[in-house]
Amino acid sequence: KQQHPPWTDDLPLCQMCGVGTAPNCTYGPDGKDTQSHPNEDGHFRFRGEEGCFLYGVFNGFDGSRVSSFVSQCLTAELLLGQLKSTHTDSDVRRILSQAFDVVEKSYFETIGDALAEKATIISQLPEGVLFHQLSPQSQKLSERLKDLEQEVSGGATAVVALIHNNKLYIANVGTNRALLCKSTSDGQNQVIQIGRPHTTENEDELQRLAGLGLDVSGLRQAALIAGQSSTRRIGDYRVKYNYTDIDLLSAAKNKPIIAEPEIQASQSLEGVTGFLLLMSEGLIKALESAHGPEQANQEMVAMVAAELAQQGSLEAVAQSVVERVKRLHHDVYASGRQRASHCSRHEDMTLLIRTLNYTLADGALTPTQGGRIYPVSVPYSNCPSSTSKTSVTLSLVMPSQGGTLTNGTNTASTLEEGTPTHTPGQSPTTTLHSTNNQTTQSSSSSSGDGGSLFRWVARQAVQPDKTGRVPPYVDFTQFYRLWGSDHGDFLGTQGASAGLGPQ
């Protein structure tokens, strides 16, 4: 039932933002997918006063109760006049941190009565007795206990972006991800992952837990804590109030699983052109399961930039990218290749895109308009010493008019002045600079020795003749000359009658 009316529906939505989603699915032996549970992700994208914008992506688990509650109530803690233009960075960070604390406490208040009833029922039921051995009255209590457990269980992880005074703040709790893509003056894309996931692979988190008296080696080995990989989460009363009953956490001196956000220092957006991505854990894991974790950030940015170059709607861009990830994930599973075993299922996926001084395409390039999309494999690597051959499939968008070739991952999404161009005879190049945890590593790769393949000759758009045909615009003379030199005998007997060559 809906206990908290969606009052946020009255808040103005940000029009510089688009969201794409896909529900969880599990693939059967026949390749068909089925949804295991209702979608548990949540998000918001609101425009406040005084140039304030608030975005969030929430990954729920064991139900959508917490993600729905947080997406409703966190907004009330941040967009009802709490943020002023006179606030300093430290003020904003404090307000953000307090908002998460208040929201979690408010959530636990809503389930307080259910928790009390649950404790009462547990005290009334005999220990160690099977359900069918219980009296009819006790069986009813046991059934009620299951309903209460379902009502109060669950939690969520969150990544929240706040733009205030033209500065970007990222508050992260758990395993969602924020990426910032900046277009540099020389036409390159710089990719920055803001913050790190809170898991047992995060050394800072392990040090925090070790300080509470927990066994770090045991946490590393277990990887999952009470069924989840996150070491920070909102809700989940079991690990907040009953952690002494969990073997991995029983030695903790204080609550080991917390909802305190890690807030990254503000970044000025003055003069920045690009986009911000907020992604749920399900989207990240689906892409990493299909192609490995090494190039996930660059590949995600490449797909977003390619869609931005072709579509005029941010909502369509975000949904198209989610669908592409879903398709990649399924194709790897269906292929039976090495990574297929990692792709038997995926969780709910959410992608939020917020553009920054980014002009959308004025209508998409489509085949009917003469535009063509050519796939290009461009290898990336986060590690300078890596010898991985994994490739990222990007797109080169061929405009129907003019003499420029626009790279889908290196463009301002329109074909106007400032769009990177391709010189005829040269191989197109894509460059993405990846920054993670203040360490910048770049990878630049040509599409190979393909200059002649993608050579583009400037000319007016070809018009059909009276019969509806267009004159040939590709010269195959060199091809037939080379082919003929290798098949001279065949040409000698068949050439005249076969009529080889363009007609």
Image (tube, rainbow, N blue to C red):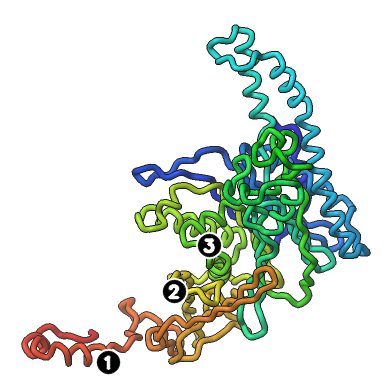
Residue 234 placement, left or right of 342: right
User: Can residue 71 be seen by looking at this rendering?
Assistant: no
In whole angstroms, how far apart are the C-alphas of marks 3 and 2? 17 Å
What percent of the width, then of the height, locates residue 174? 68, 51
What numbered label is drawn on residue 478? 1
| On-image quarter of the C terminus | bottom left
In whole angstroms, how far apart are the C-alphas of marks 2 and 1? 26 Å
Name the secondary structure under disc 1. Answer: helix
In the picture, residue 9 is in which quadrant?
top right
User: Can residue 90 be seen by looking at this rendering?
Assistant: yes
Q: Residues within 10 Å of mark 1 (few under 14, many from 20)?
A: few
What numbered label is drawn on residue 377? 2
Residue 316 placement, left or right of 157: left
- Of circles 2 and 1, the one toward us is 2
Residue at 36% in and 58% down: 337
* Marks 3 and 2, the one that precedes in the sequence: 3
In the image, residue 275 above or below residue 488:
above
| On-image quarter of the N terminus | top right
Residue type at tag 3: Pro
Q: Residues within 10 Å of mark 3 (few under 14, many from 20)?
A: some
